[in-house]
Image: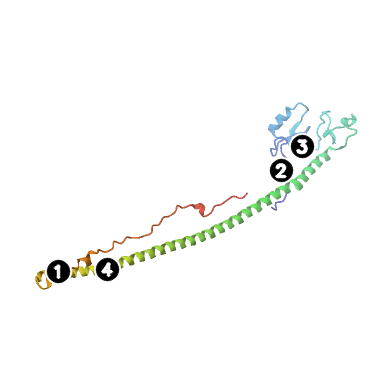
Protein backbone atom coordinates (compact mmCIF):
# COMPACT_ATOMS: atom_id res chain seq x y z
CA UNK A 1 0.00 0.00 0.00
CA UNK A 2 1.54 3.31 -1.10
CA UNK A 3 -0.84 5.61 0.78
CA UNK A 4 1.11 8.55 2.11
CA UNK A 5 0.78 9.43 5.76
CA UNK A 6 -0.87 12.83 5.77
CA UNK A 7 -2.55 14.48 8.71
CA UNK A 8 -4.00 17.86 9.53
CA UNK A 9 -4.41 19.37 12.94
CA UNK A 10 -8.10 18.42 12.85
CA UNK A 11 -7.27 14.76 12.10
CA UNK A 12 -5.37 14.61 15.41
CA UNK A 13 -8.03 16.35 17.51
CA UNK A 14 -10.23 13.93 19.45
CA UNK A 15 -11.98 13.96 22.79
CA UNK A 16 -9.49 12.77 25.38
CA UNK A 17 -12.15 10.77 27.24
CA UNK A 18 -14.27 9.12 24.52
CA UNK A 19 -12.18 9.61 21.34
CA UNK A 20 -14.97 11.51 19.55
CA UNK A 21 -13.43 13.37 16.58
CA UNK A 22 -13.35 17.20 16.40
CA UNK A 23 -14.45 17.99 19.97
CA UNK A 24 -15.70 21.59 20.40
CA UNK A 25 -14.32 22.20 23.91
CA UNK A 26 -10.98 22.32 25.73
CA UNK A 27 -10.04 22.29 29.43
CA UNK A 28 -7.23 24.76 29.96
CA UNK A 29 -6.42 23.45 33.43
CA UNK A 30 -6.05 19.80 32.35
CA UNK A 31 -4.88 20.51 28.80
CA UNK A 32 -7.32 18.03 27.23
CA UNK A 33 -9.89 18.20 24.42
CA UNK A 34 -13.51 17.46 25.33
CA UNK A 35 -16.77 16.76 23.54
CA UNK A 36 -19.92 18.31 24.99
CA UNK A 37 -20.98 15.14 26.82
CA UNK A 38 -17.60 14.51 28.40
CA UNK A 39 -17.17 18.20 29.26
CA UNK A 40 -20.18 18.01 31.58
CA UNK A 41 -18.81 14.95 33.36
CA UNK A 42 -15.36 16.53 33.50
CA UNK A 43 -16.68 19.63 35.28
CA UNK A 44 -18.30 17.41 37.93
CA UNK A 45 -14.84 16.26 39.01
CA UNK A 46 -14.27 18.44 42.09
CA UNK A 47 -10.80 17.15 42.91
CA UNK A 48 -9.40 20.14 41.04
CA UNK A 49 -10.60 23.27 39.33
CA UNK A 50 -11.42 23.13 35.63
CA UNK A 51 -11.73 25.79 32.99
CA UNK A 52 -13.54 24.54 29.89
CA UNK A 53 -13.44 26.92 26.93
CA UNK A 54 -14.13 26.68 23.18
CA UNK A 55 -11.40 24.67 21.53
CA UNK A 56 -10.39 27.65 19.39
CA UNK A 57 -8.83 29.13 22.50
CA UNK A 58 -6.49 26.14 22.71
CA UNK A 59 -4.25 27.79 20.15
CA UNK A 60 -4.38 31.13 21.91
CA UNK A 61 -0.86 32.00 23.07
CA UNK A 62 -2.34 32.59 26.52
CA UNK A 63 -1.07 29.78 28.75
CA UNK A 64 -3.37 27.76 31.07
CA UNK A 65 -4.09 29.00 34.59
CA UNK A 66 -2.25 27.39 37.47
CA UNK A 67 -4.30 24.72 39.32
CA UNK A 68 -2.97 25.99 42.69
CA UNK A 69 -2.70 29.71 42.02
CA UNK A 70 -5.77 30.18 39.90
CA UNK A 71 -5.05 33.80 38.99
CA UNK A 72 -1.64 32.99 37.55
CA UNK A 73 -0.79 31.62 34.14
CA UNK A 74 1.53 28.64 33.81
CA UNK A 75 4.76 29.30 31.93
CA UNK A 76 6.60 26.13 32.87
CA UNK A 77 5.97 22.41 33.02
CA UNK A 78 7.29 20.20 35.83
CA UNK A 79 8.35 16.81 34.47
CA UNK A 80 8.41 15.08 37.86
CA UNK A 81 4.93 16.27 38.83
CA UNK A 82 3.62 16.00 35.27
CA UNK A 83 1.78 19.31 35.73
CA UNK A 84 1.99 22.88 34.43
CA UNK A 85 3.35 25.33 37.05
CA UNK A 86 3.36 29.11 37.47
CA UNK A 87 5.95 31.52 38.87
CA UNK A 88 4.49 31.25 42.38
CA UNK A 89 4.90 27.47 42.22
CA UNK A 90 8.58 27.99 41.40
CA UNK A 91 9.02 30.53 44.24
CA UNK A 92 7.42 28.12 46.69
CA UNK A 93 10.48 25.90 46.33
CA UNK A 94 8.29 22.82 45.85
CA UNK A 95 9.81 22.16 42.45
CA UNK A 96 13.43 23.20 43.13
CA UNK A 97 14.87 19.73 42.54
CA UNK A 98 12.55 18.96 39.64
CA UNK A 99 13.26 19.22 35.94
CA UNK A 100 11.27 22.02 34.36
CA UNK A 101 10.69 23.09 30.80
CA UNK A 102 8.80 25.76 28.87
CA UNK A 103 5.14 24.80 28.74
CA UNK A 104 4.88 25.45 25.01
CA UNK A 105 7.94 23.31 24.39
CA UNK A 106 6.25 20.61 26.48
CA UNK A 107 3.25 20.71 24.17
CA UNK A 108 5.53 20.51 21.13
CA UNK A 109 7.34 17.59 22.76
CA UNK A 110 4.05 15.72 23.24
CA UNK A 111 3.04 16.41 19.66
CA UNK A 112 6.39 15.21 18.35
CA UNK A 113 6.18 12.08 20.48
CA UNK A 114 2.72 11.31 19.12
CA UNK A 115 3.87 12.05 15.57
CA UNK A 116 6.84 9.72 16.01
CA UNK A 117 4.62 6.94 17.33
CA UNK A 118 2.15 7.36 14.47
CA UNK A 119 4.84 7.50 11.77
CA UNK A 120 7.28 4.89 13.01
CA UNK A 121 5.17 2.47 15.04
CA UNK A 122 1.44 2.51 14.40
CA UNK A 123 1.32 3.35 10.67
CA UNK A 124 3.95 0.73 9.68
CA UNK A 125 1.89 -1.89 11.49
CA UNK A 126 -1.16 -0.89 9.46
CA UNK A 127 0.98 -1.08 6.32
CA UNK A 128 2.09 -4.59 7.29
CA UNK A 129 -1.51 -5.60 8.00
CA UNK A 130 -2.67 -4.22 4.63
CA UNK A 131 0.20 -6.00 2.84
CA UNK A 132 -0.62 -9.24 4.66
CA UNK A 133 -4.27 -9.00 3.61
CA UNK A 134 -3.25 -8.41 -0.03
CA UNK A 135 -0.95 -11.45 0.10
CA UNK A 136 -3.72 -13.58 1.57
CA UNK A 137 -6.23 -12.35 -1.03
CA UNK A 138 -3.80 -13.28 -3.81
CA UNK A 139 -3.29 -16.70 -2.22
CA UNK A 140 -7.06 -17.27 -1.98
CA UNK A 141 -7.49 -16.41 -5.68
CA UNK A 142 -4.53 -18.56 -6.79
CA UNK A 143 -5.49 -21.53 -4.64
CA UNK A 144 -9.15 -21.33 -5.70
CA UNK A 145 -8.07 -21.34 -9.36
CA UNK A 146 -5.89 -24.41 -8.71
CA UNK A 147 -8.79 -26.19 -6.98
CA UNK A 148 -11.12 -25.46 -9.89
CA UNK A 149 -8.56 -26.93 -12.31
CA UNK A 150 -8.09 -30.04 -10.15
CA UNK A 151 -11.85 -30.58 -9.85
CA UNK A 152 -12.37 -30.15 -13.62
CA UNK A 153 -9.54 -32.59 -14.38
CA UNK A 154 -10.90 -35.08 -11.86
CA UNK A 155 -14.34 -34.63 -13.39
CA UNK A 156 -12.94 -35.33 -16.87
CA UNK A 157 -11.40 -38.57 -15.57
CA UNK A 158 -14.73 -39.56 -14.06
CA UNK A 159 -16.56 -38.75 -17.30
CA UNK A 160 -14.06 -40.86 -19.22
CA UNK A 161 -14.34 -43.73 -16.75
CA UNK A 162 -18.15 -43.52 -16.77
CA UNK A 163 -18.13 -43.54 -20.58
CA UNK A 164 -15.91 -46.65 -20.50
CA UNK A 165 -18.23 -48.36 -18.01
CA UNK A 166 -21.29 -47.52 -20.13
CA UNK A 167 -19.52 -48.75 -23.26
CA UNK A 168 -18.59 -52.02 -21.53
CA UNK A 169 -22.12 -52.60 -20.21
CA UNK A 170 -23.70 -51.85 -23.59
CA UNK A 171 -21.23 -54.19 -25.29
CA UNK A 172 -22.14 -56.92 -22.82
CA UNK A 173 -25.82 -56.42 -23.57
CA UNK A 174 -25.13 -56.50 -27.33
CA UNK A 175 -23.16 -59.76 -27.01
CA UNK A 176 -25.84 -61.36 -24.88
CA UNK A 177 -28.51 -60.28 -27.33
CA UNK A 178 -26.56 -61.77 -30.24
CA UNK A 179 -26.04 -65.07 -28.43
CA UNK A 180 -29.67 -65.34 -27.38
CA UNK A 181 -31.01 -64.45 -30.82
CA UNK A 182 -28.61 -66.90 -32.45
CA UNK A 183 -29.91 -69.72 -30.25
CA UNK A 184 -33.54 -68.82 -30.88
CA UNK A 185 -33.03 -68.42 -34.63
CA UNK A 186 -31.31 -71.81 -34.83
CA UNK A 187 -34.17 -73.44 -32.96
CA UNK A 188 -36.64 -71.52 -35.08
CA UNK A 189 -35.11 -73.00 -38.28
CA UNK A 190 -35.33 -76.51 -36.84
CA UNK A 191 -38.97 -75.97 -35.92
CA UNK A 192 -39.76 -74.62 -39.40
CA UNK A 193 -38.22 -77.76 -40.96
CA UNK A 194 -40.18 -80.03 -38.64
CA UNK A 195 -43.40 -78.13 -39.29
CA UNK A 196 -42.92 -78.57 -43.04
CA UNK A 197 -42.24 -82.27 -42.54
CA UNK A 198 -45.36 -82.60 -40.38
CA UNK A 199 -47.45 -80.81 -42.99
CA UNK A 200 -46.11 -83.20 -45.65
CA UNK A 201 -46.95 -86.17 -43.44
CA UNK A 202 -50.44 -84.83 -42.84
CA UNK A 203 -50.98 -84.48 -46.56
CA UNK A 204 -49.54 -87.96 -47.23
CA UNK A 205 -51.88 -89.44 -44.65
CA UNK A 206 -54.87 -87.65 -46.16
CA UNK A 207 -53.94 -88.92 -49.62
CA UNK A 208 -53.39 -92.44 -48.32
CA UNK A 209 -56.70 -92.47 -46.50
CA UNK A 210 -58.51 -91.14 -49.57
CA UNK A 211 -56.87 -93.72 -51.85
CA UNK A 212 -57.91 -96.69 -49.72
CA UNK A 213 -55.07 -98.50 -51.40
CA UNK A 214 -55.02 -102.01 -49.89
CA UNK A 215 -51.40 -102.40 -50.81
CA UNK A 216 -50.06 -99.04 -49.49
CA UNK A 217 -52.09 -98.71 -46.29
CA UNK A 218 -50.61 -101.76 -44.58
CA UNK A 219 -47.09 -100.71 -45.55
CA UNK A 220 -47.36 -97.21 -44.04
CA UNK A 221 -44.77 -96.61 -41.33
CA UNK A 222 -45.85 -94.15 -38.64
CA UNK A 223 -43.86 -91.01 -38.07
CA UNK A 224 -45.39 -90.13 -34.73
CA UNK A 225 -42.29 -91.12 -32.74
CA UNK A 226 -40.25 -88.74 -34.85
CA UNK A 227 -42.63 -85.83 -34.38
CA UNK A 228 -43.66 -86.55 -30.80
CA UNK A 229 -40.38 -85.19 -29.48
CA UNK A 230 -41.48 -81.57 -29.11
CA UNK A 231 -39.15 -78.58 -29.55
CA UNK A 232 -36.98 -77.60 -26.63
CA UNK A 233 -38.53 -74.94 -24.42
CA UNK A 234 -35.78 -72.35 -24.51
CA UNK A 235 -35.44 -69.90 -21.64
CA UNK A 236 -34.69 -66.26 -22.11
CA UNK A 237 -31.44 -65.41 -20.36
CA UNK A 238 -30.94 -61.67 -20.06
CA UNK A 239 -28.80 -59.69 -17.64
CA UNK A 240 -30.40 -57.19 -15.27
CA UNK A 241 -28.91 -53.79 -14.65
CA UNK A 242 -28.72 -52.96 -10.94
CA UNK A 243 -27.74 -49.31 -10.56
CA UNK A 244 -26.08 -48.34 -7.32
CA UNK A 245 -27.25 -45.27 -5.41
CA UNK A 246 -25.39 -42.10 -6.26
CA UNK A 247 -22.95 -40.97 -3.58
CA UNK A 248 -21.37 -37.61 -4.34
CA UNK A 249 -18.73 -38.22 -1.66
CA UNK A 250 -17.19 -40.89 -3.91
CA UNK A 251 -16.12 -38.11 -6.26
CA UNK A 252 -14.30 -36.27 -3.49
CA UNK A 253 -14.98 -33.39 -1.15
CA UNK A 254 -13.44 -30.14 -0.02
CA UNK A 255 -11.74 -29.87 3.33
CA UNK A 256 -10.76 -26.62 5.00
CA UNK A 257 -7.09 -26.46 5.96
CA UNK A 258 -6.43 -23.89 8.66
Q: Is residue 76 visible?
A: no
Sequence-first tag of 3 and 1:
3
- How far apart marks 2 and 3 lie (CA) works out to 16 Å
Q: How is the image coloured?
A: rainbow
Left or right: 254 as drawn, with respect to 29: left
Tell me where residue 102 appears, x and y as whole percent. Answer: 85, 38
Q: Residue 48 vs residue 36: left or right? A: right
Determine whether label 3 and label 1 are within 8 Å by CB.
no
Neighbor class of circle 4 (other Cα within 10 Å; few <14, some 14-19, many 20+) is few
Q: Residue 87: give x, y in percent of width and height.
A: 87, 32
Q: Which residue is mark 1?
A: 205
Residue located beneath label 2 in the image:
11
Compared with residue 254, is residue 77 higher up or lower down, i.e. above or below? above
Front of the two marks 2 and 3:
2
* Of 156 and 137, the residue lying toward us: 156
For residue 234, above or below residue 24: below
- Which label's residue is closer to the chain start, 1 or 2? 2
Give the mark toward the camera: 1 or 2.
1
- Say which residue label 4 marks: 190
| Secondary structure at numbered mark 2 | helix
Spatial distance from mark 1 to mark 2, Cα to Cα? 127 Å
Q: Which residue is mark 3?
A: 58
Mark 3 or mark 4, which has the lower sequence index?
3
Label 3 to label 1, Cα distance in Å?
141 Å
Amino acid sequence: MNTKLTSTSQDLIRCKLCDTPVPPLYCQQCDINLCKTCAGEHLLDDTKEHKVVPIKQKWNPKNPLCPKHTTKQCDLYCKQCDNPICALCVLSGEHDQHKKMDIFERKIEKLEKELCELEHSIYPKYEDAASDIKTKKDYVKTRSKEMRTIIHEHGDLWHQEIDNIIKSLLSEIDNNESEQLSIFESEERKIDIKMNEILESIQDLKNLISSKDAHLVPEYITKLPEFSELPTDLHVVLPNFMPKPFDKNLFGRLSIAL
